[in-house]
Amino acid sequence: MKKADFLDALRQLSKGASKETLTTMLFVVARQVPANDYGMAIKDCARAGAQVYTEAVPEGADLKAAEAFVKKARDGGFCLEWDYERSEYDEEALLDQDGLGERAGYFLKSAAANNSRKQYKEALGIFDALFDLEAFDHDNYVDEGVTLQMLFDQDLVTFDFNDALLQYAYAALMVLRDEKRVEKFETIAFQFREDFQLRRIFSAGEDEIPECGRFLDQWIARLTQRYSPDIAFFMQDRVMRCLIDALKYKGGVEALSSFAAEHGADYPQVYVDLIAIYIDQRHFMEARASALDALATLDAAQNPDTPGSYARKCRITITEQLRTIGEYIQDSDAIRTGIWEGFRAALDLRHFLPLYQIKDKDLLFQAIQLLPSDGKMSVDLGCVRFLNGDIEQVWAQCAEDKASLGWSAGFKGSLFPLFVALLMKDHIIRPCAKKLIVDSLCADPDNTFAVFAAYIGELRLPDSGYDRYWAWCEKEAADRVEAIVRGQHRRSYGKASLLVTAMAEAVASRDGMAAALEYINSFRLKYPRHTTFHACLRKDITRGEFSAK
């Protein structure tokens, strides 16, 4: 059954039906909606309700009136003023004293009503005029044009911006053809504030889109021409999302798979979405094959894969997908490949830590060889080198930083907790030292810390090195506590007390609990009047389970 026949049949069924009957019909149909589409179905229903224009459109709400309104706004016919003081945020508020936004909303409803009456040419003309709006008021120094989008941003238009674009796109598809249609659709599509779907645009009205298949081919061709690694990251993502949506609409998973096989090296996000669909459908063998094919294809293509690039982001995601697939099907080779390729693509701490699970010293050695060996180390690179046993190199860079304040997120502040943990003579990382590491380095404490602890537990220091690192940690901790507490940086008292108790745990592991309590008490005596600092200490003493035993 064609869409037009289907809608006609629905219309006949609903004619004269009571509210109760219509509600029952709605819920019968709703039971057929797949679980994955529940959220979208609710949004579609809400939007459909907002787009019913049963009231008569006021006289004069036509194309000529809309064009006259836009001209009046451009000529300074509306009183506008920017006022910083009335804004709730760090932006100026637009004072719209003559109802520019209200009038714009009125014409948007008029355009949507024309769509409902199938007067698509009239609707498109009104939308074109409104989206070309630039309002000025030179008397009040509004010299940069106020656009329709700015009116939406200021909450001056009682109409949803994405719904306006949805109606605009539908009108353009109904009226224009070929190149003009694709150009107009591109202009509209790239303004959406959320991922739009062709399915929703094509069903925004009752009529079928003329020459829909031809348009889809032209739209896909345009998007493939628009995509380039040289355009801005956000635009790469936007173009890619539109392309994937068009491929899905045209032929579903099969279309994505065919496109990836032919063009995946240039459009890596297609692989990411294809693999995600296979995983959601629990087609793990197809997902694994696609992930391995993607990595091989991207390797062979040798595309620019610089840090922060879109291609690199996609590659990293694919390695994580492969690892997930391996865990689902208990495929150790897939897990190993995903972990190794993930680190090779990312060269960061998050992707280095899982290498420990593989228990392969040769692989760890290969991983270290991939790291840059010159210049200042980043925090991630410093952590990787520390965990690999290159402690002296990391310490040398930390020691160059003589600051005692403001280093929480810096190289020294991030790596210092690892040195404290290394001082534990029994190689057990206690609660305060653990929190010091978690606060500095663990985005995922439950999983990440255990790997940190395992790595550090295997590191061994000669006595001479131990004494030197101990002296350095002891001085750094004392200097930082002094700078924080004596400087009355009350918001950082918790950081200071955690440093004291973490170091006290190291003292306990070396010299016993009595020495640890004596170490903590020395800071109480040094800062006797700083009661807030003392309160933080009591909290961390409890955390560290210090006792006189």
Image (cartoon, helix red, strand yellow):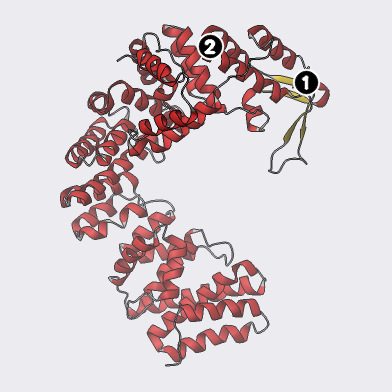
Q: Which x, y percent locates residue 499?
A: 51, 74
Per the image, label 2 sits on a secondary structure element best described as loop
Q: Which x, y percent locates residue 302?
A: 28, 32
Q: Which x, y percent locates residue 153?
A: 63, 32
Q: CA distance from mark 1 to mark 2?
A: 31 Å
- In the drawing, what numbered circle is on residue 78? 1
Viewer-side label of 1, 2? 2
Q: Callout 2: few (<14), some (14-19), or many (20+) C-alpha neighbours within 10 Å?
A: few
Comparing 20 with 187, the one in front is 20
Q: Split into 4 quadrants, where in the image is the C terminus?
A: bottom left
The image shows residue 345, relative to residue 103, as above or below, that is: below
Comparing 238 with 358, the one in front is 238
**Of the image marks 1 and 2, the number of the one nearer the N terminus:** 1
Name the residue at 39% across, 24% down: 199
Comparing 80 with 17, the one in front is 17
Looking at the rendered structure, the kind of residue marked 2 is Arg
Name the residue at 60% across, 27% down: 159
| Residue 138 in view (yes/no) | yes
Q: Callout 1: few (<14), some (14-19), or many (20+) C-alpha neighbours within 10 Å?
A: some
The image shows residue 541, relative to residue 236, as above or below, that is: below
Looking at the rendered structure, the kind of residue marked 1 is Phe
Residue located beneath label 2 in the image: 117
Question: Which residue is outermost to the right?
Answer: 139
Q: Quadrant of residue 536?
A: bottom right
The image shows residue 181, relative to residue 508, as above or below, that is: above
Q: Quadrant of residue 144?
A: top right
Q: Which x, y percent locates residue 323?
A: 25, 48
Name the residue at 78% across, 20% down: 78
Q: Split into 4 quadrants, where in the image is the N terminus?
A: top left
